[in-house]
Image (cartoon, rainbow, N blue to C red):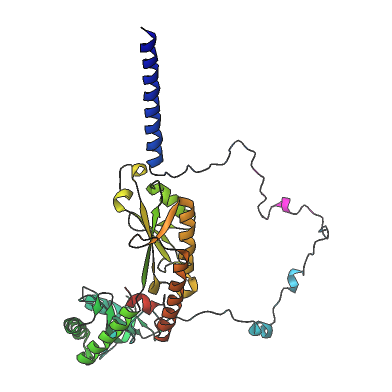
């Protein structure tokens, strides 16, 4: 082999190696970012000794009367509270919320007066099979003879009167004449079964009230949605979940959905984070590429004291920094930080208007109306 051939062979090998290295680097750069492995504690390290409180003999190691300068406090016999002093103690503040049952503010209600007291079992047997009239929730409540409270009929209880109701409006629209007629038919059938006399309101007045409430709800229904888009490398589902979990998000009921829970258990989530469902259901999620995720807030479902929009801004900023993303509107147009301030001002005005209508954001009635 001549010197020229040997030189060409070496040059060709180097070029091939460079091509392979470049392709490898490009693949790694464009591959979706994966979740980092969790750090595990070093099991070889000597564990720190913990002293748990207990009532064993070892706990009484100090001689009586010796507390090494610590204040022993009063004797147990001195822990007595005067009744008069106890009555003067301040009561912790709490907020009253409308009961979760029927309410004339957002429901059409009809009184159903039976001739005799009706058992809860009989009332349950007489309930209609469905709890909707068209697209509107339908419910029947009974006045408990013992507690004198309106409640959903329950077995073993006795009820002296009933009331039926159907919601005036929701996000499906206002109650119409057909839905009102279906409500009357269902309530009348229940009344006939328990031998009660119904008293229905005027249909035209209630339908007009439903349209007015629906117009108000439409004018004050705010559902904010923002997009976080990857600047360079895409994200894997695990990478998104890991970064969101650091901010308090937990998996939602549907694939590709994470939620930030409210401070009170059982209430709707503060924020919702969503991404491609197909990527979440992929056989190998680490190979799924996610270019953008959505961050949304249903304003009427969350109380203003939770400061959900401020939380949304903080979460968006933290995710953008950690995941190398950019905040955009729902159409993908980048948003400057100053664009969020006017939204915050508009939301405060919206909260005040909902409060003035007794439909405060996050209240039971608001969650029912804006659903």
> Which residue is situated farthest in the front direction here?
4
* Along the viewing direction, whichever of 81 and 178 lies nearer the viewer: 178
* Quadrant in which residue 137 is drawn: bottom left
Q: In this rendering, would 34 be left or right of 189?
A: right
Q: Is residue 136 above or below residue 34?
A: below
Quadrant where the N terminus is found in the figure: top left
> Which residue is situated farthest in the top direction here?
1
Q: Main secondary structure of the magenta part?
A: loop
- Looking at the rendering, the stretch of residues picked out in magenta corresponds to 46-63
User: Can residue 308 be seen in the rendering of this structure?
Assistant: no
Quadrant where the C terminus is found in the figure: bottom left
Residue 291 position within the rendered picture, expressed as x and y whole percent measured from the top left: 35, 51
* Along the viewing direction, whichever of 239 and 121 lies nearer the viewer: 239
* Quadrant in which residue 212 is drawn: bottom left
Residue 50 is inside the magenta segment: yes
Q: In this rendering, would 347 be left or right of 163?
A: right
Q: In this rendering, would 50 be left or right of 69?
A: left
Residue 302 is inside the magenta segment: no
Residue 250 position within the rendered picture, expressed as x and y whole percent measured from the top left: 43, 57
């Amino acid at each position: 082999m001549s010197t020229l051939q040997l030189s060409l062979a070496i040059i060709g090998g180097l070029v091939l190696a460079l091509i392979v290295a470049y392709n490898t680097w490009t693949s790694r750069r464009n591959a979706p970012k994966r979740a980092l492995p969790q750090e595990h504690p070093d099991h070889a390290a000597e564990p720190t000794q913990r002293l748990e409180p207990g009532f064993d003999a070892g706990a009484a190691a100090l001689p009586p009367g010796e507390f090494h300068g610590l204040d022993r406090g009063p004797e147990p016999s001195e822990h007595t509270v005067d009744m008069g002093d106890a009555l003067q103690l301040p009561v912790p503040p709490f907020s009253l919320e409308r009961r979760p049952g029927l309410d004339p503010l957002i429901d059409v209600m009809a009184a159903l007066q039976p001739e005799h007291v009706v058992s809860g079992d009989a009332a349950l047997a007489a309930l209609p099979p469905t709890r909707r009239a068209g697209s509107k929730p339908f419910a029947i409540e009974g006045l408990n003879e013992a507690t004198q409270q309106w409640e959903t009929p329950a077995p073993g209880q006795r009820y002296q009167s009933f009331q039926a109701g159907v919601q005036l409006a929701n996000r499906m629209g206002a109650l119409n004449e057909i839905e009102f007629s279906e409500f009357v038919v269902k309530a009348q059938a229940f009344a006939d079964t328990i031998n009660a006399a119904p008293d229905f309101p005027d249909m035209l007045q209630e339908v007009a009230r439903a349209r007015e409430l629906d117009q108000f709800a439409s004018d004050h229904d705010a559902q904010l949605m923002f997009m976080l888009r990857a600047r360079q490398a895409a994200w894997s589902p695990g990478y998104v979940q890991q970064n969101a979990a650091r901010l308090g998000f937990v998996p939602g009921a549907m694939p590709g959905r994470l939620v930030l829970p409210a401070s009170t258990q059982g209430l709707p989530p503060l924020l919702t984070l969503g991404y491609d469902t197909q990527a979440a259901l992929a056989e190998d999620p680490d190979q799924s590429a996610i270019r953008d995720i959505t961050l949304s807030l249903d304003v009427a479902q969350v109380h203003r004291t939770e400061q959900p929009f401020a939380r949304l801004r903080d979460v968006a900023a933290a995710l953008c920094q950690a995941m190398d993303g950019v905040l955009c509107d729902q159409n993908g147009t980048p948003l400057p930080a100053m664009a969020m301030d006017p939204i915050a001002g508009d939301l405060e005005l919206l909260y005040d208007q909902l409060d003035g209508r007794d439909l405060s954001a996050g209240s039971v009635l608001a969650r029912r109306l804006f659903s």
